[in-house]
Each structure stands twice: as structure tokens, then as C-alpha cells.
Amino acid sequence: MSPKNTSSIVTRSLAMVDILASSGRPMSYSEVLAASGLAKSSTHRLLSILQNEGVIEFDERNKTYGLGQRLRGWARQSWINSDLQRQSANELEKLCESCGHNVCLMGMDGARTLVLSAIHPYQVPYAAKMGEYAAAHCTAGGKVLIAYMREKQRNKVLDTLTFEQHTPKTITDRKVFEAQLDDVRRDGLAVAEAEEFMQTSAIAAPVYDHHGEVVAALCVWGVTERMKPRHVTDWADDLKAATRRISKNLGWVYD
């Protein structure tokens, strides 16, 4: 398929989403067809593609189209991420200054962790930057984000994970990993020691939104030779205090 054709499909697909988003209500096929101005075959094809991708939904009972769960999830996550950026920026800076280690805020995208923001007082080749992905099963942030998922979602993610071995210390057994998730929920803290890279260790704690849902993990991680005289786990109290303040800024009220 040529770039021109690809662009055309993307443009028309987005136009279709715009039609459904601006209608304020579910629409029938004939209504979408009239609003799009496209041929019947093109309209049907685009609706099918968008439906298969979860961007729109088809109500079998009422024979109408509406915005899909995937699109609503994007919108929600975009709002959460922008709010997180505002509410967490100062805390990341203060935590980085107090501990002297790298800090980052991580979210979940499918079965991978996504770096939402990061501060690196010292640069290393494998330091993940904002917008980059990391494996979930061997990072402290990934463990936190999976541990606090609802059971159905957690099992879906665990079914997706391949548990690829990155170092001799990477957890490659699902049952062992699930047992560690129990510890994370009990302690409110995840630890990853030389699991992604042999040279690094990390800790992470959950950040809650106003509904009490875990929307991010705040992490402190360090390179082994730079962590002396204090081990990265010694910063657990400071880390948890920072996540509590961010969560309060997002509207979460602790018991």
C-alpha cells in the first residue's frame, strides 16, 4: 500500500471518528453514511476497521455506532497523564535532589511500562527517557502497575507477558512473579535488583487518582557503583511520602 493510500485511510478514519464524537449520541449506519459523504463500500470498510480496533463500537440491539472503549481509554489516559505531569513534577525534582538517584514516573501501555517523565542526575546508556518503553516483569514500576490492577486485567496482562530473561536475576516463572506481586500489594513497594540490567537496582511505589485507582508508579533507581554509601531501598520512606503527596494532589484521600 502506498503512503498516499495509507494517509487517505487514516484521514478518512479520523473523519469518521470525528463524526461520531461530535454527534453526542450513537448513530445509525445511514446517518454515518450521510454525514461522511463517502460511498457505501468505503463507509462500511472504515467502520469495520475502526470497530475491529476497538475505536468504535456497534450496538447490535439498536443497530447504532458509537465511540469505543479503546478511544475512551485513550482520552482518559491522556487526561491522567497531563494531570500527572502537573501534579508530580515538583515531587520528582525534590525526590531526585534528596536521594541523588535517577527518578521516573511510569504508566502502563498494554503489557509494557511507559516512562511518563524522568530525571537523571547522571546519564547512563540504558536510562529510559520520557516516552520510551520498558519490560514490565523486570522493572519495579512494572511490578507495581501490574500488582494493583483489577484481577481480570492483571490476568490478561500476565497471559500476554513472555517473561523474557534479561539477566540471570530476571523472574521468568509466572507463579514466582505472581507471588512477588502479592508482596508488592502487601508492602506497597516493589523492588527490582539487577533484573533488567545487572548494573541497576530500583524501587517503586503506587500513585493513586481520585477514584483510588493506581495510575502510575514512582520509581527511584540507581547504578550500583553510584549507590554507596546508601542502598536504593533506603529511600523507600522518602519515595512513599512523595507518592502520597502526588496522590493527594490528584484528589485521593488516604484513610
Image (cartoon, rainbow, N blue to C red):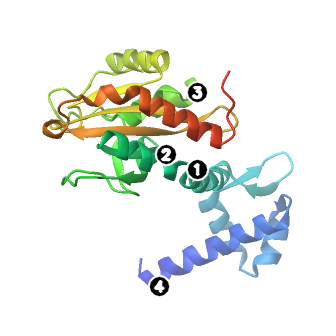
Residue displayed at 84% across by 66% down? 23
Q: In the rendered structure, which amino acid carries the disc numbered 1?
A: Gln
Camera-side mark, 3 or 4: 3
Q: Which residue is mark 3?
A: 150
Mark toward the start of the polypeptide (1 vs 4): 4
Residue displayed at 84% across by 45% down? 61
Q: Residue 48's spot in the image, x, y percent?
A: 64, 60
Q: Which residue is mark 1?
A: 87
Residue displayed at 62% across by 60% down? 50
What crowding class fits label 2: few (fewer than 14 Cα within 10 Å), some (14-19), or many (20 or more)?
A: some
**Disc 1 and disc 2 in contact, CB within 8 angstroms:** yes
Task: Say what secondary structure mark 3 lies in.
Answer: loop
Mark toward the start of the polypeptide (3 vs 2): 2
**Disc 1 and disc 4 in contact, CB within 8 angstroms:** no
Mark toward the start of the polypeptide (3 vs 4): 4
Depth check: give the residue in front, 198 or 61. 198
Q: In the rendered structure, which amino acid carries the disc numbered 4?
A: Lys
**Disc 3 and disc 4 in contact, CB within 8 angstroms:** no
The image quadrant where one finds the C terminus is top right
Mark toward the start of the polypeptide (1 vs 3): 1
